[in-house]
Image (cartoon, rainbow, N blue to C red):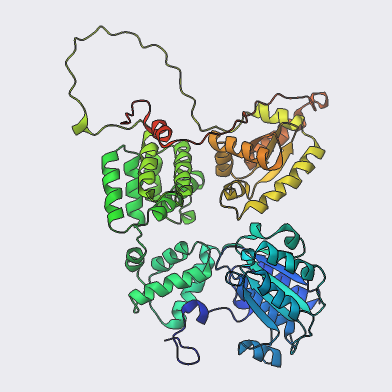
Amino acid sequence: MRYNIGMAYQVLYRTYRPAKFSEVVGQDYIIKTLVNAIRNNKIAHAYLFAGPRGTGKTTIAKLFAKAINCEKFKNEACDKCENCKAYLEGNHPDIIELDAASNNGVDDIREIIEQVPYAPMLGKYKVYIIDEVHMLTTQAFNALLKTLEEPPAHVIFILATTDPQKVIPTVLSRCQRYNFSKINLYEIKKRTIEVLNAEKIPYEEKAVEEIARLAEGGMRDALSLLEQCLAYNPDEVKLEDVEHIFGLTSTSEEVDLYKKVHTNDISEVVRKLREMYGQGMDTKRLAVDMIEIIKDVLIYSDQGKENLLSRVTAIEAQDIMKLVPTENLLKDAKNLEEVISREKQNANFLSYLELALIQMASTKTGVKAPEANRPQEEPVEKQPERKAEPVEEKVDSFVVEPENDLLLSILLDANRDLKIADQIIYNKLVLFQYEPDKRKFYQLLIGTELFASNKDAIIVCGKRMQADSINTKSTNEELYRFINKEFGIDKMIYAIDEKKKNELIELYKKTPAEMRNRPVYIEKYKIEEKKEESTEDRLRSIFGDSLKIEE
C-alpha cells in the first residue's frame, strides 16, 4: 500500500512521478536539450512547455528547476546538496508554482512581479512555474509581458500549457518553446508494467495494452486508469475487468460488427449496436477502435506482414479484405472520423454513429430493406428481353494516383524558388498539431516531403497509403481549401509514393531540355462559401430522395 507523510494514501501517478530526468518517459529530445543547456550554462530566461495533458510538462519543469539550482549537477541533480534536499522536502524557497487555472487575474501576476527583483534565498535561480498559463486573462498576460522581456538575471519563468494558441503572441515570442508529444503506446505499456511489477500485482498483457490505448498518449492518464482497475479488482489487472469498467467491446466483436456492415445486414448492425450501448459501451471508443481496425487492414493489404498488426489478427484482416475494397476502407475511415468530430456537439452520438454505419453499408451495394418490410410485388406480364442501354458509370469519390503525364508536366514546369517559398509555409503545418479542427491536416501530411512546386500545384511524397488518403477526392478538396484559407496558396496538392517519385525522376531525365518550363493547365476546385447542412439535407445525402420527412 502506498502512503506518504501522515499515512495518507497516495495515488499511483504521484507515487511514480519521475524524480530524475532519466525516469521521464517519451520526451527524450526535450530532456537532452535541457541537460545540454545546463551543462553549457546556456539557460534561457523564459520557457514555454506546450503539449497534451499527462505528457510530463509540469514534471519536467520541476526537475529542470531542481537541476539548475543543484550545486553538483552532472546530467542529473545530485539529490544530496542543500538545494536538492529542500526541493525533495517540498519547501525550496526559490521554486514557486502558480496554477493559472485558479489564479489567473492581474493581481496574482502583480504579486509575482513584486517579488521578482529580490535575489534567491537559497539557490542560484528563482524559478516561477506557471501551470495552465493559457488561462491567464489578457490583463494578466500584459502585466507579465514587461518582466518576461527584461527579467533580472536570477529569474527564470517556465510556462506550461495544453493550449498554446490561447497564449498571446507577444508572450510566445519571448519564450523558448518545447512541444511535448503524446507518449507512444509501447512506452506507456512498458512504464505501466514497471509500476505493476513494483506493486507486485499480476496482470494480463492485453489488459495493460488496452489501458495504454485508452490513455491516448498521456502517462498520467494511464496510471489513473490503472488506479480505477485496481480499485475494482486489487488482486489482478484483467482484460475482462478493463472492458467492463470502461465500457469497451472486444476486438472480435468490433470486427464482427464491421463485417456485418459490409454484408448489408443493417437491421442486425443496428440491433447489435443498441445492445452494446445498453451494456454501457463507449460509442466514441467504438468509432475510434473501428478506425484502428481499418488502419490495420490497410497496413496488412499493403505490407502483408502480421507483425505490423496491432488490433486484428491476419485472418481477421484477410476476412475484411475479401469484403471491402481498399477505396471503401478509406471512405469508411473518413465517415467515422467525421462522426467522431461531431461527438462534442451532439448529445445523441449513438444516432450519428448508426447513420455513419448505414452510410458505410450503402457505399458498396446500396442499403437493402429488411425482407419483412418489403412490399409484395404484383405479378406482371413478362416482356420480351431488350438489349441494355449503356449506363454512365458514376465517378467514385476515391481518386487514384494522378497520371504520370500530369505529374511530369508539373515537374517540368517546377521552379526551385517556388519550392523554397512553399517549403517555408509547409513547415508551418506544425502550428496546427494542437488545434482540434485543423489537426487532421497536420496528421495527413506529417512524414511527407515536398517534392516539387510550380505556380499551380504542389507534389508531396509519402508512403503509399498516405498518398492514397491525400488523393481521396473529398480529402484533397478539403486540403486545397485549407491551404487556400490559411496560407493564401491557390495550388492543387498531388501525393505520390517513393516508387512513383523514382519513376518521375527517370522520366524527367529522359525529357529533352527544350520541353522543360512549359506551362501546364491545372484544373482547381472552386472556392465557394459552404452553407451549413441541415439535418434533413444530411439524411437525404445518406438515404436519397426517397426519404419522406413528416411535416
Question: Exactly how many numbered labels are in the figure?
Answer: 0
Where residue 36 sits in the image (x, y, percent)? Answer: 76, 73
Is 44 left, or right, of 164 in this rendering?
right
Q: Look at the image and tell me in which quarter the C terminus lies.
A: top left
**Is residue 325 something that shows in the picture?**
yes
- Residue occupying image coordinates x 58% and y 78%: 18
User: Residue 369 appears in which quarter of the rendering?
Assistant: top left
Vertical comparison of 403 with 179: above or below: above
- Residue occupying image coordinates x 66% and y 39%: 485
Vertical comparison of 376 with 235: above or below: above
User: Residue 9 appears in which quarter of the rendering?
Assistant: bottom left
* Residue at the extreme front: 107
Is 492 left, or right, of 420 in this rendering?
left
Is 284 left, or right, of 410 in this rendering?
left
Q: Look at the image and tell me in which quarter the N terminus lies.
A: bottom left
**Is residue 79 something that shows in the picture?**
no
Where residue 130 sits in the image (x, y, percent)? Answer: 65, 72
Where residue 283 sits in the image (x, y, percent)? Answer: 38, 53
- Residue occupying image coordinates x 75% and y 42%: 422
Judging depth in this view, the residue of 185 and 443 nearest the camera is 443
Vertical comparison of 282 with 229: above or below: above
Judging depth in this view, the residue of 147 and 282 nearest the camera is 147
Where residue 122 sits in the image (x, y, percent)? Answer: 74, 90
User: Residue 473 appears in which quarter of the rendering?
Assistant: top right
